[in-house]
Amino acid sequence: MTLLHWDRLRAMPTGKVVTTAVVALCLTLWLLPVVWIGVLDQAASASWPSAPGTMTASEAYRPPGLRLSRRYRIEYEYRVGDTSFTGSTYHLARVQVPFVDSAARVTGDHPVGSPVQVRYDPARPRVATLRAGLRWYDLALSMPLSISAILLVFMSFAEASRRVFGGSTHSAG
């Protein structure tokens, strides 16, 4: 069973197909910039300058209602010139890979009071990260997510236009 199933879309009433197309487009227009701005910032962070910092918070926790999931909350302080900043970002890519950036690993590697090297954007020093550079797994989830969103928009608009304007979106055979 797949999420993007053409027969399921074709079985929907026309109003639902049009609604699905509009909602899919809105979500995609929101999702793609959110995901890819994080990926591009993560890639750029490899060349950002670094500043010494200190961990001020580091904890792993279970979100309410998600028994199997563990998240982390970190905070660190760092200085750029005469200005002090507080950061809370481990990496900038919005899609996290649990087996790589696990809560236990992140908090274990960065206990409260430990020194850290903070990479910061020289144009926006408030934008900072502890894990600089892009890894293969940053793209491993971002690419399929983006492609699926675009396919959903394409499929739903193709079916909506077939129903509203007539004609067929596929050849008989």
Image (cartoon, grey):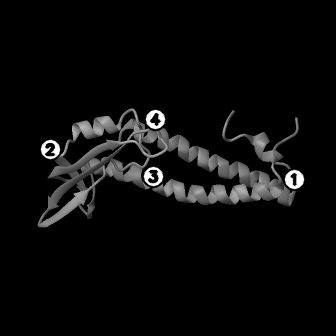
Disc number for residue 36: 3
Residue pointed to by mark 2: 114
* Label whose residue precedes the other's in the sequence (4 or 1): 4
**In terms of image quadrants, where is residue 163?**
bottom right
Q: Nearer the viewer, residue 56 or 129?
A: 56
- The amino acid sitting under disc 2 is Ser
- Which quarter of the rendering shows the N terminus? top right
- The amino acid sitting under disc 4 is Leu
Between the residue at mark 3 and the residue at mark 4, the CA separation in whole angstroms equals: 27 Å
Residue 70 placement (x, y as % from top left) = 39, 39
Between the residue at mark 1 and the residue at mark 2, the CA separation in whole angstroms equals: 65 Å
Label 2 near label 1: C-beta < 8 Å?
Answer: no
Between the residue at mark 4 and the residue at mark 1, the CA separation in whole angstroms equals: 48 Å
Instruction: Give neighbour class at mark 2: few <14, some 14-19, many 20+ (Cα, 10 Å).
Output: few
Residue 66 placement (x, y as % from top left) = 48, 41
**In terms of image quadrants, where is residue 106?**
top left
